[in-house]
Amino acid sequence: MMGSDTLSIVLTAYLAMAVVMAGLWVLQLRVRNASIADVGWCAGLIAVVLWYATQATGETERKMLVTALALLYAGRLGFYILLNRVIGKTEDARYQRLREQWGASERLKMFGYFQLQALAVAAFSLPFLVLVHNPRSPFALIELVGLLIWIIAVSGEALADWQLAQFRSKSWNRGRVCCAGLWRYSRHPNYFFEWLHWWAYVIMGVSTPGWILTWIGPIGMGWALLKVTGIPWTEQQALARRGEDYRAYQRRTNAFFPWFPRGSQ
């Protein structure tokens, strides 16, 4: 599946995103909100997958389904970030902390971060590329299993984001820890469902040429959420803001996989 033509398509997608992210980096110099990189990632993923579908040789119905999945997943996430972290909002504390740490080299390092987002679009678009090139017809049962996982995961992530937004919208919750709804069973249910969502493409792509590339999704996203930009940054900020309340939340609630809360310790 990954012949010279396919590699050329992926390289073109990456170079296009590198230009887009450079433009967004210039924009953030003005607005001072690096969360636009996350919005750009979502929009870029949609654009790249749509372009893949026009270049792929797979079944038309499957290409339509895959592009719809990309549009719904990344579109919802992108709009959520745009409305909750960009428009009329101050910059996310994680990015503010990075700017402080980088000091005089902040502009250059932020440019590098935006370019990493371009590379991430190219990497995380590969599962979709595998699926749109799938030559099988008609749909296999395993694809329906993957679709069910996708529905559960994307719905769960959307619900977790909505519950957190509703909690934060109440002035009396300022400074408090959200432990209602899905947040009662996981400290980061949105991250868990985000990770679970990438498994849907692994399942849907079983026995497809290039299937190994679909594993980039859950492995790469799991590493990022658990070790890099997800839980470590978020929890550090939560501890700084909420102190002992958040430590108590940590003691009774799983960090990632949802489970019933433990008794007070």
Image (tube, rainbow, N blue to C red):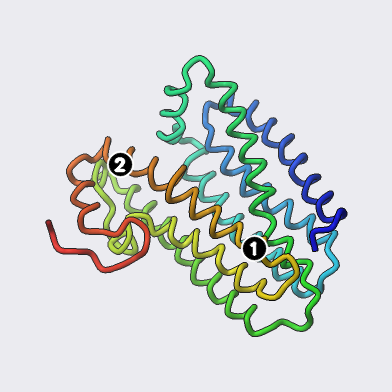
Q: Residue at x 48, y 41 (%)?
A: 85
Q: Secondary structure at mark 1?
A: helix
Image quadrant where residue 204 sits: bottom right
Q: Is residue 246 left or right of residue 140?
A: left
Residue pushed farthest left?
Answer: 265
**Disc 1 or 2, which lies upstream in sequence?**
1
**Foreground: 150 or 2?**
2
Q: Quadrant of the C terminus?
A: bottom left
Question: Taking 184 as reference, is 12 above or below it?
Answer: above
Relative image position of residue 89 (x, y in whole percent): 46, 35
Where is mark 1, residue-wise?
214
Q: Residue at x 13, y 59 (%)?
A: 264
Residue highlighted by disc 2: 238
Q: Secondary structure at mark 2?
A: helix
Q: Position of residue 185 (x, y in %)?
A: 30, 64
Looking at the image, which residue is at 53% across and 73% down? 149
User: Which quadrant of the structure image shows residue 135?
Assistant: bottom right
